[in-house]
Image: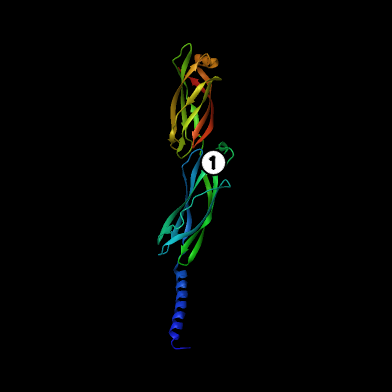
Amino acid sequence: MSRRLLPLVALVALSSSGCAYLAQFLRTAFQQPTLTFKNLGLTDISLGGLTLDTIWNLNNPNQVGLSLASIEYALAIEDKQVVAGAPPQGLQIAPGASSELHFPANVRFQDLAAVVETFLTKDFANYRASGALGVNTPIGVIRLPLATQGQFEVPKVPLVQFGNPRITNVSFAGATVEFPLAVTNRNTYALPVNGLTGTVSLAGANIGTLSTGSFGSMEGKGVKNVTLPLQVNFLSAASAAGAIARGGNAQVQFNAQLQSGGLNLPVNVNQLVNLLR
């Protein structure tokens, strides 16, 4: 072999062994990043649906930054697949730091059950998340599996109850009945209630319509109290007129629709009250 080729051969051999040594060094020195489930977030809650967000911690123990190369994520609620968002690809994870990853899913209850009211009778619903993240590292792409399952609290329709109505402005033609109404949010979280409207029967006679207007966002376990006056015409509600004249106990029925999250849900109250003067 020519003497002039010997340095080139040596350089190639040195470069090859150097690259192999460097690769071996990186594999030995590099620490595996970890992906752990942190918690479940619920936002935008209404009787029509909510946003369910699984939140994860991606920890990078190395002194070199990493980035996401690929994302596979699937979310099922009550064994029904729902569409979920994902962190943007190219997300950078700083050296020696953790990044919080969010996978939000906008869930509509009408997609989970043929009748929304049936779904809302549940106390809890099951969810299951699965998939994997591909992370770019100095030693190539590392695949980190993700999997978790659990339950979340299903929102409940508020409880509606009458207080004892008060009778005022009595005449031969009619009277005013003031209906106290308590609406209770049975959930531990805030719930928007855009109104409650329905027909009222007193002692079996239809006496008119009550409407509360919007309650806005009701705080968890919160109660809204309203008093709604209703003018009763004795000529068109004879049995109600008799109950008002006698006073004391009478049966009240309220067949209403409650608005929340773009849905109208039935609320039916059948209650014995004491008519006050």
Tag 1 residue? 109
Q: Is the residue marked by circle 1 packed among few (<14), some (14-19), or many (20+) residues within 10 Å?
A: many
- Name which residue lies at 56% across and 36% down: 117
> Residue at 50% across / 58% down in the picture?
70
Between residues 153 and 115, which one lies in front from this camera angle? 115
Looking at the image, which is closer to me, 99 or 73? 73
Work out whether 173 lies above or below 123.
Answer: above
Specify the farthest residue to the top: 172
Using the rendered image of the protein, determine whether residue 73 is visible from the camera's viewpoint.
yes
Q: Is residue 110 above or below residue 250?
A: below
Q: Residue at x 53, y 46 (%)?
A: 151
- Kind of residue at badge 1: Phe
Please indicate whether residue 61 sits to the left or right of residue 115 in the image.
left
Name the secondary structure under disc 1. Answer: helix
User: What x and y, as percent, mark residue 207?
Assistant: 52, 20
Q: How many marks?
A: 1
- Say if residue 158 shows up in the picture: no
Vertical side of 149 occupied by 68: above or below: below
Q: How is the image coloured?
A: rainbow
Return the x and y of residue 248 as percentages of the image width and height.
50, 18
Task: Name the residue at 49% across, 63% down.
Answer: 141
Image coords of residue 214 (percent x, y): 44, 31
Which quadrant of the figure contains the C terminus? top left
Q: Position of residue 140 (x, y in %)?
A: 48, 66
Question: Taking 59 as reference, is 75 left or right?
Answer: right
Q: Nearer the viewer, residue 241 or 68?
A: 68
